[in-house]
Amino acid sequence: MNDISLKDALKVVGTRPVRPDGVDKVVGRAQFGGDATMPGMIFGATVRSPHAHARIKKINTAKAEALKGVKAVITAADMPEIVSEEAFVGEGPMNFRDLSNNLMARDKVLYDGHVVAAVAASSMSIAKAAAELVEVEYEVLPHVIDEIEAMADGAPVLHDDVFTAGVDPKPTKPSNVAKRVEFAKGDLAAGFAAADKIIERTYKTAPVHQAYIEPHACIAAYNADGQCTVICSSQGQFMVRAYCAKLLGIDISDIRVVPAEIGGGFGGKTLVYLEPLALALSRKAGRPVRMVMDRVDVFRGTGPTSGGTVKVKLGAKKDGTITAADAEIILQAGAYPGSPMGPAAMCCWAMYDIPNARAVGVDVVSNRPKVAAYRAPGAPISTFGTESAVDEMARELGLDPIEMRLKNAAKNGTKALYGPTFQNIGYVETLEAAKAHPNLQAKLGPNQGRGVATGFWFNIGGESSASLAVNEDGTLVLVSGSPDIGGSRASMAMMAAEILGIEVEHIRPIVGDTASVGFTFLTGGSRVTFATGMAVCEATNEVVKQLRGRAAKIWEIDVEAVEWRDGSAYPAGDNAGKFEPLSLADIAAKAARTGGPITAKGAVNAQGAGPGFGTHVVDVEVDPETGHVKVLRYTAVQDVGRAIHPSYVEGQIQGGTVQGIGWALNEEYIYTKDGRLDNASFLDYRVPVASDLPAIDAVLVEVPNPRHPFGAKGVGEVPIVPPMAAVANAICAATGVRMTSLPMSPPKLKAAIDAAGK
Amino acid sequence: MAKTHVTCTINGEETEFLCDPNQTVLDVLRDDLGLTGSKEGCGSGDCGACSITVDGRLTCSCLMLGPEAEGKSIGTIEGVATGDHLHPVQSQFLKHAALQCGFCTPGLIVATKALLEKHPNPTDEEARYWLAGNLCRCTGYDKILAAVHAAAAEMRGESA
Ligand code: FES
Ligand code: FES
């Protein structure tokens, strides 16, 4: 059954069963982060900076503490001072000290919304009133938001201990440029010299938020014996545990983190904002503390992803052969170093086999919330630049954009700019499938245009644990350590059911807390179906082995003479037909007499995740009077390796695509002159709504990944990479106007159309 | 602050509660009545996660104050299924994988049910505009619309 070429032999994988956690979610019974309660719980609230950059001169909590019903007030003075140390706990680079200071500002506030104190009280309204009573004296400092302005001489410097890493010679002065990385191959100068046509452009993207609909929420209890329980919605219960332990100086074994259902994350819930504060408040108050953000706090204090500048230079021959490609990606890290400029640089040319190429990433701090991962971190920003440039080149050379890409496509054996040599990739297959899709036959009318763009994401593996236990009646419980954001419990159960040869309904998959399942890296990087799936398969194979052993014992034959198929043990070889097959239920019923409980664990550090590629084609109509863009048709093709549950794979592609459309057309952080976020609500930060969109046609291409038992590749992140360039390219096709700055909102597009006199 | 005594009907059951005059119906449902199926995504009427019906009318419970519920008949996600029998909107959401994280789902189901009770056969555009007040960040709405149309067909008695 590990022969992935035998797709037709699969009975469960590739079907579309109702997800096991579905009913709870449609009847309103599923428990999300803000739904849990504990006996005696009180309510926490935060005090946030109104300034983009300021020194904290004094905090006076006396009035807040005196308010009736207030149980605890904390500031940075109540949190251990953490030394600078790289953390490998979440997604992307992180430093424990920076995270501690991000949770609760110590000497300086670095952005509007930075937490300076927290209170806990017997009701939410008292907690909010107490937060208002905390008096903070600030010395306001000059601030900077934009990454280019932050790099300029004379810009306000956020940290006096940040010296640009990765440059030679080592700088002697601190600056906002935290780091520079470079990936290069071949000879750029020679490549450009060999080009018939060179395109050079600078692109700009606005900072955007992940905008999960569930605000951050947790409840935390610090018991008198030092034992802690945290129930929260996050992308990794082990991540929350590790951060709480480190930031509060508690042993890991004293903290139990119970994963609640998570109402969307997209990378934004791969770090902590509330949990350590709630625990610190609980420790001080002696009561469990619940903290739930409101939407304004979510926008001001969490997430977002970088805004950035992408400088692209591209050279090609008349026939479309790319001879040289260069990109510099400058990304805002927010208040502390750690933008996704690395993956941005690594991904931006990965779709192409280019002899001479370079990608440079630059990490720049500025007075915005510390950025968090957002779906394929960095890649959508850099790829907006590179895929816009490739489109412009195709247009200049009079080539079809898909043909241009086919001509230069990365294939098996292509050595990627960032190092590895690709194997079993399906980029060309996505281009071919897009070309063949009926949507590309649709006739376009006036002011309508078609745009193509492609994208890449690595997908990752990493550490995962799972355990499987056979119940007394032959049903099973499957525990894994991966929070399920988009239906992964279903795919875990399906893989186990496929191996066991039983119906998926006989397996109950759950997400374990940190005390009931082995360590599992967080849900991110499109790793769960791949890596946790491998742990599940390992555990299931072991259970099958034990089941065969039990049958052998019952029949008193050699285990090698027992075959497992369709959910039952069969005598094989010489013994074939000698005994009646034993079903899972039969064996389970006899477990006590044949050796006791039947359980197994899977624990992997999965390597060999298959990289993902997608090709998107979008048709838009531009209203030249208003600059409004209507998306008419959208085709998103992706190589998914093997779709375990195709509906949820399509769902990932559709959801990622629509986030990309929002990023392209509407979404942006808007700041006032004094550095305050001016649009911290869903009214003013406009994510796509149902009436903005057409159907999103997700097309699955399957080039299996031989490193996974069923051939799965990660799917969640690729789909957000191409849309911005695809939409820009379609707008250019419709209007002749090349938009180089996101979002391509009506006023901006209208101005560009007017300026071009079209 | 003196609490206000309110009598109303919630999911068909007569219910009494005490609330602060400035407390929202959403907070009353979630914090005082244990009906946590309605969610708060924004608290400002922009996301629809808190959708309920008030005398049959689709309403954001985060924008309605507790005392305003006096004498009203309120429907929440907890009242959509009958016992363990799912409403067609619920079963079609499951069948069509119209949820990923599921946080927007209660609001979308309440909104869809309200739509189909009023307009049993909406066009795609009508359905999309009706649901424009319900944000979903996970699905891109595609499968939600498929579920809405399938539920409409089922409720009309057509074989889905
Ligand atoms: S919580 Fe009521 S509309 Fe968002
Ligand atoms: S399913 Fe997550 S917001 Fe809709």
Image: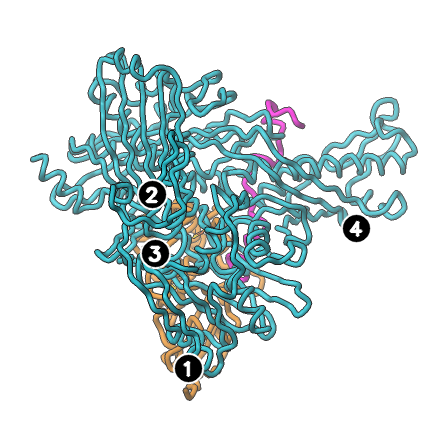
Q: Secondary structure at mark 4?
A: loop
Mark 2 or 3: the one toward you = 2
Looking at the picture, do discs 3 and 4 lie on one chain?
A: yes
Mark seen at residue A175: 2
The x, y position of residue A599, in whole percent, is 76, 44
- The residue under the point 54% across, 60% down is A80
Foreground residue among A69 and A443:
A69
Circles 4 and 2: CB atoms closer than 8 Å: no
The x, y position of residue A733, in whole percent, is 20, 30
What's under tag 1, amino acid-wise?
A: Asp
Residue A279 makes an appearance in the image: yes
Q: Which lettered chain is shown in orange?
A: B
Looking at the picture, do discs 4 and 1 lie on one chain?
A: no
What's under tag 4, amino acid-wise?
A: Glu
Circles 1 and 3: CB atoms closer than 8 Å: no
Residue A8 is left or right of residue B94, and the answer is right
Indicate whether A621 appears above or below A433.
below
In which chain is the residue bearing label 4?
Answer: A
What's under tag 3, amino acid-wise?
A: Tyr
Indicate whether A141 appears above or below A361.
below
| First-in-chain label (3 vs 4) | 3
Local packing at callout 3 (Cα closer than 10 Å; few below 14, some 14-19, many 20+) is many
Provide the residue designation for mark 3.
Answer: A111
Mark seen at residue A708: none
Work out how far the residue at label 1 is from the one at label 3, CA to CA, in angstroms.
34 Å
Task: Identify the colour of chain A in the image.
Answer: cyan
Looking at the picture, do discs 4 and 2 lie on one chain?
A: yes
In which chain is the residue bearing label 1?
Answer: B
| Mark 2 C-beta closer than 8 Å to ligand 2 | no
